[in-house]
Amino acid sequence: MPETPHPGGAQGASLSDARTTSAGSFRFVYPRILIFLCFPVGYAAVFMVPVLSCQPKEYKTNGGQCCPTCNKGRVVQRDCTAFSGTQCRPCEMGTFMNQPNSLYNCFPCTACDTGRGIFVKQNCTATTDTVCDVLNGYYCKGLTDSNRCSLAEKHSQCEAGQRIKEPGTSRSDTVCEDCQPGFFSKDGVNCTGWKTCSESQIKVEEGSSTSDVVCGSASRHRYVFISSVVLSLIIVICLVTTGFVKAR
């Protein structure tokens, strides 16, 4: 008796083939997804190597090792090793170090040049630089990067006919100002107003920016004038008389 085909045979076979194909596709795609996901992780693991970071009071040697820094007044003599710490040496005379450091040489002390209007206010030590200050009557004209004075000049002297508007300081020069009309100054310090002649006086000499008005007695001036006129007349009479006598 011939077998009767199962009504769902063809459909079942198709479903089975589809499952097989789907499973095969999944097995083919799944490794690619894993490779795609694992590649960045592997890249980061290989190339993104963490950088060695030293502590605030440490420094990194050329070999990449973190070593303790040296204190003020000292510099590195030998870097640390796996078995010993940093070896530091003190600053020699004439040098200093004013901060914790990883340097191998101390800074040279600043020299105060007294010929430039400055003097040593505080001597150099192993931990501090020399402190220079300005002499009296001088002002600083040259500042270093550390705001220290390296050159000073004498304060300017105001001339006659001027006054001191602003006195000089250790950081600024003297500021001078001309005397206003009606005032004078002989020494270039202060301007003084011209004096006024009294009623019994006359102005003998006008004032200027450098000299005061000169007053004189009116009566004395009158006597001087009369005496001059009389003397002139006498001289003229004598000359005329002498000429007349010679003519005879």
Image (cartoon, rainbow, N blue to C red):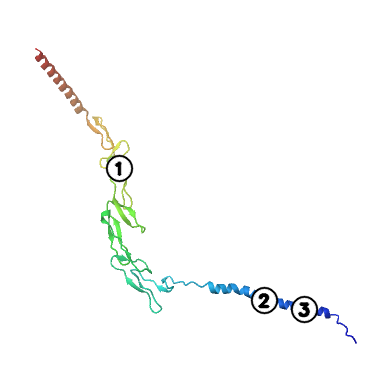
**Could you tell which of marks 3 and 2 lies nearer the N-terminus?**
3
Query: Which quadrant of the structure image shows residue 98?
Result: bottom left
Q: Kindly report the distance in space between the C-alpha atoms of the residues bearing marks 3 and 2.
A: 20 Å
- Residue situated furthest front in the rendering: 2
Q: Kindly report the distance in space between the C-alpha atoms of the residues bearing marks 1 and 3.
A: 115 Å
Comparing labels 2 and 1, the label whose residue is closer to the camera: 2
Q: Are marks 2 and 1 in contact (CB under 8 Å)?
A: no
- Residue situated furthest top in the rendering: 248
Q: Assess disc 1: are there few (<14), some (14-19) or many (≥20) residues with their C-alpha within 10 Å of its C-alpha.
A: many
Residues 185 and 241: in front is 241
Measured as percent of width and height from the top left, residue 28 is found at: 68, 76
Measured as percent of width and height from the top left, residue 200 is found at: 23, 29
Query: Which residue was labeled with disc 3?
Result: 17
Measured as percent of width and height from the top left, residue 23 is found at: 72, 78
Tell me which amino acid carries mark 1.
Arg
Query: Which quadrant of the structure image shows residue 150?
Result: bottom left
Tell me which amino acid carries mark 3.
Asp
**Could you tell which of marks 2 and 1 lies nearer the N-terminus?**
2
Query: Which residue was labeled with disc 2?
Result: 30
Q: Kindly report the distance in space between the C-alpha atoms of the residues bearing marks 2 and 1.
A: 97 Å
User: Where residue 199 is drawn, which disc sits there?
Assistant: none
Horizontal side, residue 215 vs residue 34: left or right = left
